[in-house]
Image (tube, grey):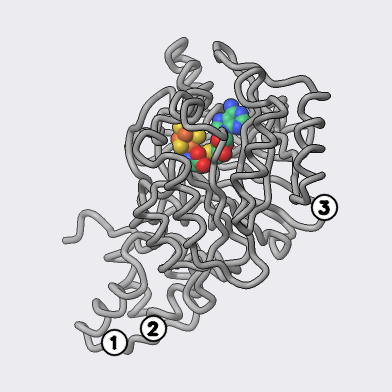
Amino acid sequence: MITKKINIIEFGFEKLVDWLLARNIESYRAEQVFKWIYLRQADSFNHMTDLNKEMRTLLSQHYSIRRLEKIRVEKSRDGSSKYLFRLKDGQYIESVLIPERDHYTLCVSSQVGCAQGCRFCLTGRDGFIRNLTKSEIVSQVRDISRDIVDSVRFTNIVLMGMGEPLANYKNVLSAIQIITDNKIGLNFSNRRITLSTVGLIPNLKYLGRDTRVNLAISLNATDNRTRDMLMPVNRRYPIEKLLDACSRYPLQSSRRITFEYVLLKDINDKPEDAKRLARLLRPLKAKINLIPFNDYEGSEFVRPEESIIHQFQEMLLRKNYTVIIRDSRGQDISAACGQLRAKTNGERRKSEKQKRLYDTTEKFSGYQFLSHY
Ligand code: SAH
Ligand code: SF4
């Protein structure tokens, strides 16, 4: 008797082909199965009408098609939605769906917590718990895609949620391969996926070799002393080594590397910083995203005043850079990277009873919480 079914999203296409061949079943059946799972969002093998009954039974005896457990969705005034998922081992992750003018962008997590310990980041403050599996990363995209009514407009993905994607390279790469596969995957374009990293140089090289996704580098400072203080990773991979690796990064024609720069009052927001930033990026094909620091309770940093933010942008524009001020979306519901989960952990510490309430609500409807915001 079979007791534990295998999660087919984690198992994957190649292994299913082998498994079928070992039973003298044609390999194209695996293609049919994965088309149902990703393109048609099937939740049961019984729905796969182009497979015969015997095969559907065989597959459902051995495999399951799982979704993440959706705990709640918080909707922001600006239209973005934060999804909170609970994983099999009780850990929480978040994904943020952002409606843009003509499309949706989904911000996806790659780890539970993060080991990089950037001082301004709430995810970093709680430390590292574990890597997400391939299926946990892919399922954020698959599950949320099912929720979107006009899902054809869901075209963009940013790996900018919780965690450092290049510290979970193997699983992130496998997930990207599925997300971009147009036969047995989710059929997203590489051009519309962006991976954001603090710049773990060895894996940065592999990323350039193995994928065609866009690259974003969290630079956040223009001198090593400040970056050392803000981002411990800088002691291993200082600015000059990181930028050198960026200059060797294989870029498709007309593409540029995005440099993210979190603006922190009196730390990295002076005119000299803007000048140094312009000089540092000069040899590269670069564009710049300025992210005004997103405040949270107990943070030691402050967001600069609007006039300073615009002055900083202006100086870079004058040096002919494309510079976007990217304010974190959904500020009214629990702002940037990692803050939703941190809030939930706080709530859990405060009240186990409240947590049980989430559990009960979820049984009725995953959307229950929407009505409260
Ligand atoms: N670990 C990756 C991706 C996740 S963080 C990375 O660091 O690049 C995504 C972006 O959010 C990074 O550019 C990071 O610098 C920024 N960020 C983190 N905490 C922030 C905060 N409180 N306010 C504004 N930006 C923040
Ligand atoms: Fe990790 Fe990115 Fe936060 Fe740094 S900014 S702690 S790398 S998630």
- Who's the residue at 43% across and 75% down the image? 33
Question: Is residue 372 in view?
Answer: no
Say which mark, if any, is on residue 29: 2
Say which mark, if any, is on residue 25: 1
- Who's the residue at 67% across and 39% down the image? 81
Q: Nearer the viewer, residue 156 or 359?
A: 156
| Residue 127 point in image, percent of width and height | 37, 27
| Residue 117 point in image, percent of width and height | 41, 28
Chain-order first, disc 1 or disc 3: 1
Name the kind of residue labelled 3 in the image: Arg
Asked if marks 1 and 2 touch (Cβ < 8 Å), the reply is yes
| Residue 331 point in image, percent of width and height | 70, 28
| Residue 167 point in image, percent of width and height | 36, 46
Name the kind of residue labelled 2 in the image: Arg
Q: Nearer the viewer, residue 242 or 7?
A: 242
Judged by depth in the image, the label closer to the viewer, 1 or 3, is 3
Along the horizontal axis of the image, is 324 left or right of 68?
right
Dividing the picture into quarters, in which one does residue 141 lie? bottom right
- Spatial CA span between label 2 and label 3: 39 Å
- Who's the residue at 61% across and 49% down the image? 281
Chain-order first, disc 2 or disc 3: 2
- Who's the residue at 58% across and 51% down the image? 158
Judged by depth in the image, the label closer to the viewer, 2 or 3, is 3
Q: Is residue 291 above or below residue 210?
A: above
Say which mark, if any, is on residue 164: none
Name the kind of residue labelled 1 in the image: Ile
Quadrant including the C terminus: top right
Q: Helix, strand, or loop for circle 2? A: helix
Q: Nearer the viewer, residue 253 or 131?
A: 253
